[in-house]
């Protein structure tokens, strides 16, 4: 992510989150037809995943959760002993099907299309919000 407002916002939410947060960017830089680019990006994302990670794919066709529902899902994973969560956000053409099939869960940030850099900030904010909900902090209001 280039320097600017989104990078600053990303950095702010990463600082607010407890626990280790890693962000890996992968990008196919060669000029390829869209289907080939999507497939290659899927391969790169799969290769970047930690072996033990529970994979959560972000896709507009995924399940939409409330913020409280997302917090509950994170808490359930924690109680089930999930040590590593990996959230993947696709590029301009979305996520390759092998990656979506590998995902344990597919979540939606809404049915609108979001630029992947903005989707990253939205995800980080929801992770922070879930952390605060689970801690009983009044950050989240219904």
Image: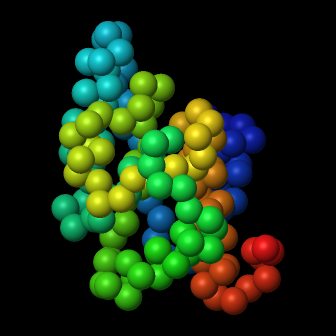
Query: Can you tell which quarter of the image residue 7 is in?
Result: top right
Where residue 81 appears, x then y in whole percent?
Answer: 30, 84
**Residue 128 visible at all:** no
Residue at figure coordinates x 37%, y 66% from the top left: 85
Residue at figure coordinates x 29%, y 34% from the top left: 96
Colour mode of the rendering: rainbow
Rendered position, 58 above or below 76 = above
Where residue 110 appears, x then y in whole percent?
Answer: 60, 46
| Residue sitting nearer the eye, 11 or 112 | 112
Where residue 19 appears, x then y in whole percent?
Answer: 49, 76
Rendered position, 72 above or below 113 = below
Query: Can you tell which quarter of the image residue 67 is in?
Result: bottom right
Rendered position, 42 above or below 47 = above
**Residue 31 visible at all:** yes
> Which quarter shows the N terminus?
top right
Query: Can you tell which quarter of the image residue 80 is in?
Result: bottom left
> Which quarter shows the C terminus?
bottom right
Residue at figure coordinates x 51%, y 50% from the top left: 108
Where residue 121 appears, x then y in whole percent?
Answer: 62, 50
Residue at figure coordinates x 30%, y 18% from the top left: 35
Q: Is residue 85 left or right of residue 119?
A: left
């Amino acid at each position: 992510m280039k320097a600017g407002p989104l990078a600053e916002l990303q950095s702010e939410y990463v600082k607010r989150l407890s626990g280790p947060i890693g962000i890996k960017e992968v990008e196919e830089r060669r000029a390829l037809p869209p289907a080939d680019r999507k497939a290659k990006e899927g391969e790169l994302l799969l290769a970047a995943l930690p072996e033990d990670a529970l994979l959560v794919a972000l896709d507009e066709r995924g399940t939409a959760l409330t913020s409280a529902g997302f917090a509950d899902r994170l808490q359930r994973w924690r109680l089930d002993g999930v040590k590593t969560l990996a959230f993947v956000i696709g590029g301009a053409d979305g996520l390759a099907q092998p990656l979506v099939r590998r995902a344990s869960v597919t979540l939606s940030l809404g049915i609108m299309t979001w630029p992947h850099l903005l989707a990253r900030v939205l995800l980080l904010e929801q992770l922070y919000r879930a952390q605060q909900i689970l801690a009983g902090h009044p950050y989240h209001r219904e």
